[in-house]
């Protein structure tokens, strides 16, 4: 079974009201998926007022619809065969990715954050990376870089368990 690490950047923290504007996935075999998603003018107005992390607004404005990006992601995942989805914060990312049009409701695995926290409630990805002696590569709070780091961190955690 292929492990796939997903990450999202969103218009806010509430999966019931906010939308995905950037999504990425990194598979154990090195395959990667990355896309911006344009959630429509109403939600884009929200992020114009309060920018989301380091997501470039022009990329979101020129992006495809959430339906198109979700369909493309599901096709990409299907091409990998049987997968288990991991995320740094599974609770957060699954909350968004299980909703329509994404509909990734099954096949979720371990929360990398909880594995890295070692009994603590919450730890930032950058802090967990440092704790495990890894060096950050890329830009924090960008979906593809965060998915890559979650994969590297989870691999370090799995090696430690052996």
Image: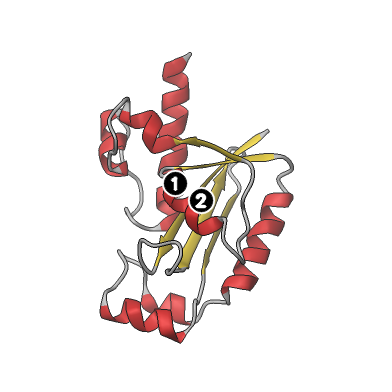
Q: CA–CA distance between discs 1 and 2?
A: 5 Å
User: Which percent across, then down, holds residue 132?
Assistant: 31, 28
Q: Is residue 65 above or below residue 159?
A: below
On the image, the x and y values in percent for residue 136 come to 31, 43
Q: Which residue is mark 2?
A: 94
Q: Residues within 10 Å of mark 2 (few under 14, many from 20)?
A: many
Neighbor class of circle 1 (other Cα within 10 Å; few <14, some 14-19, many 20+) is: few
Eyeballing the image, is 86 above or below 115? below
Which type of secondary structure does the marked residue at label 1 adopt? helix
The part of the image, by quadrant, that contains residue 111 is: top left
Residue for point 32% across, 68% down: 52
Residue 51 appears left or right of 2: left
The disc at residue 151 is: none
- Residue at screen point 44% across, 46% down: 91
Q: Quadrant of residue 67?
A: bottom right
Q: Residue furthest front?
A: 16
Above or below, 67 relative to 99: below
Task: From the top left corner, tell me how far across and down residue 33 is, in percent.
Answer: 57, 56
Under tag 2, what secondary structure?
helix
Residue extending farthest top:
162
**Image vertical order of residue 10 relative to residue 140, above or below:** below
Mark 1 lies on residue: 91
Residue in view at x 40 percent, y 29 percent: 115
Coloration of the structure image: secondary structure
145 relative position to 72: left or right: left
Q: Position of residue 157 (x, y in %)?
A: 42, 25
Q: Are marks 1 and 2 in contact (CB under 8 Å)?
A: yes
Drawn side of residue 135 relative to residue 16, left or right? left
């Amino acid at each position: 079974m292929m492990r796939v690490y997903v990450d999202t950047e969103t218009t806010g923290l509430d999966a019931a009201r906010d939308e995905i504007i950037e999504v990425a996935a990194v598979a154990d075999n090195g395959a990667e998926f990355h896309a911006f998603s344009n959630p429509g003018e109403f939600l884009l107005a929200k992020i114009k007022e309060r920018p989301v992390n380091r997501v470039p607004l022009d990329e979101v404005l020129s992006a495809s619809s959430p339906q198109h990006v979700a369909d493309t992601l599901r096709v990409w995942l299907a091409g990998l065969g049987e997968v288990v989805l991991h995320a740094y914060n599974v609770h957060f990312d699954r909350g968004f990715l299980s909703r329509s049009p994404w509909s990734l409701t099954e096949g979720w695995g371990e929360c990398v954050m909880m594995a890295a926290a070692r009994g603590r409630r919450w730890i930032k990805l950058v802090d967990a990376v440092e704790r495990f002696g890894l060096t950050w590569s890329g830009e924090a709070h960008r979906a593809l870089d965060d998915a890559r780091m979650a994969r590297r961190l989870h691999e370090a955690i799995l090696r430690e368990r052996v």
